[in-house]
Amino acid sequence: MVGSRARNPYRRRSDREGSLARPWGAARKEPRPPARTPADHAPPELMALSRALFDTPDEGEILRLAMDYIAAAGPYSAEAGYLKGDGDLVPSPRNGEIHASAVDCRVRELAGRDGPVAVPGRPWGRALGLRGLERLHGYLVVSSRSRPTETEYSLLVTLVRHTAAALSVASAHRRQREDALELHRLREERTALQRQLISVTAELGYQRAVHTLMADVAASGGGEEAITRALHRLTGLPALVEDRFGRLRSWTGPGRPDPYPEPDPVRQGEMLHAVAREVGPVRIKDRLITLVRPHGEILGVLALVDARDEADEHTVFALEHAATSLALELAHLRNLAKMELRLHRELVDDLLAGTDEASAYARSEAVGHDLHRSHYVVVVQWSNRTADESFAQTVERAASAAGMRSLLTRRSDHVVLVADDRPHARALYEALARETGTRSGTIGVSARCDSLADIPHRYEEAQRALEVRRHSRERYGTTFFDELGLYRILGPGSDYRELETFVHEWLGQLIDYDSRHHAAMVETLSRYFDCGGNYDETAESLAIHRSTLRYRLQRIRDISGHDLANVEDRLNLQVATRVWKIVLGGPG
């Protein structure tokens, strides 16, 4: 639709009242003037209207002016106006709504010709085409309360022609402006294309340099460090490679943290998930990060440290191509690790039996597990299930449902997990109960393992915890080895190391106190138990006063943190003092 200018023709009408709106047929103060019709005043009015039409650059405003002053040509009313736009006739906003539909249909039927239009209540109506030299500009639909005379109709035709001519001029000016704008746009587009061509030429040169450098890196076999050196050289930014767990593998450039921050598994997982959702590198804080994931499997992270947000499209291009080269390198390393896995026993079996740490760390990364963390060995046995592959998969699902990250293997009658966190007291058991449909199962959990070399011993602890639970009154559930107390040294396979651990747990603080202060707190406690808790006999055997014995016992409570009035503490302390004295040889 042809839009209107901010200039409003109705606002200008009052300015013309003096020349265009003088009442028609008003008698002049002359002696007996002859009666005059509106047509007698039309020529000067049309001249003023013509000037106004040709002074108006907007086609919509021209049409409105013509409709406003149509009465200057005779006893007419402007029923409707139309402008031709985009191949269609667009009604003027001044058109009435009462007969709009019928008038619209009739005007479109005329297809560019003049013709009569029926307007209810008006005996005469006609659609007059606003024709320029080249095309039809629109229509004026005029009605009259009486059939116009030849003079009145001639004036109406003159007004239509003036309006059409003004529309032609306005249309020509509009096309001229549009042509000028289009010429300006084409010139701007040409300039932009020239600049783009220059930019593309420079970018192609940069891309060739990136391809050449990365190809040289791949051919040299320099590995991850060669890739980070090349990326730093291309971008000027510090470049780094981390494994999927967030541990640094290579750094080139200034600003390397020392020591490198220990990764948080939860935050690392969230970061990997956030980057994996996006296409291309992702900015996280001061780093531009991309994942190294051939065939969809995440092998690591390649990043640029961009604290000043200086990275541009060339930086992103170099980072993406470096990630492609790194993916090939890490995939090659992964294939080597998998080949090693096929040549050796399963990783968990080796851990339980004892294995080389460097090999274990490489192989654990190949299977997607972080062995650098503290671990717990968990043994699972269910009374109605054999430890076959199906049950192993059931345990694996239950462990995952309980939020455990673990490695798994199976033995003849139980399944073994090497978990990177202490299991919840009931989570794994409840998950297995749901999976198996029965609660007749037992789980043993070792003490914390901070070294891979300790895993075989922790496996024995988990078995001990499971056996104690199976022979207890409540045989089903989870038992932790570090909560067994005295039962830790009563089961089969007790050894000197286990006895030392038990004694240190219960008497370690007292032994340290005696060593530092040349005191005899452990000996006093041993004599106290030997005398059945009798104060007089104990004081006499130690050759001290009864009040001195009472003071020492109070100090023993304060130092050790154990309460002699507690039955469980008392029993464990008594056994510990016996082992200390008899098995370990007492003081020294």
Image (cartoon, rainbow, N blue to C red):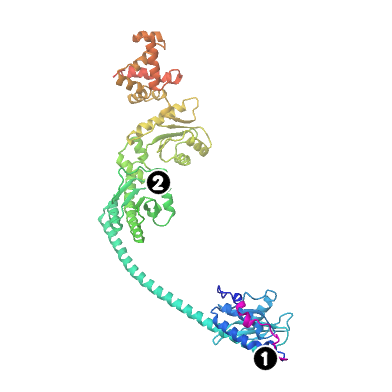
According to the picture, the residue beneath numbered tag 2 turns out to be: 268
Residue beneath the point at 66% across and 86% down: 73
The amino acid type found where label 1 is placed reads Thr
In the picture provided, is 7 more to the left or to the right than 410?
Answer: right
Please tell me whether mark 1 sits on a helix, a strand or a loop: helix
Using the rendered view, name the quadrant where residue 484 is placed.
top left
Label annotation for residue 151: 1
Q: Where, quadrant-wise, is the N terminus in this rendering?
A: bottom right
Sequence-earlier tag: 1 or 2: 1
**Span highlighted in magenta in the image:** 13-33
Note whether 217 is above or below 190 in the view shown.
Answer: above
Q: Nearer the viewer, mark 1 or mark 2?
A: 1
Please tell me whether mark 2 sits on a helix, a strand or a loop: helix
Residue beneath the point at 39% across and 16% down: 553
Rendered location of residue 27, percent (x, y): 71, 87
The amino acid type found where label 2 is placed reads Gln
Q: Is residue 530 visible?
A: no
Most prominent secondary structure in the magenta stretch? loop
Rendered location of residue 454, percent (x, y): 34, 33
Instruction: Looking at the picture, tell me which residue is in the foreground, 59 or 374.
Output: 59
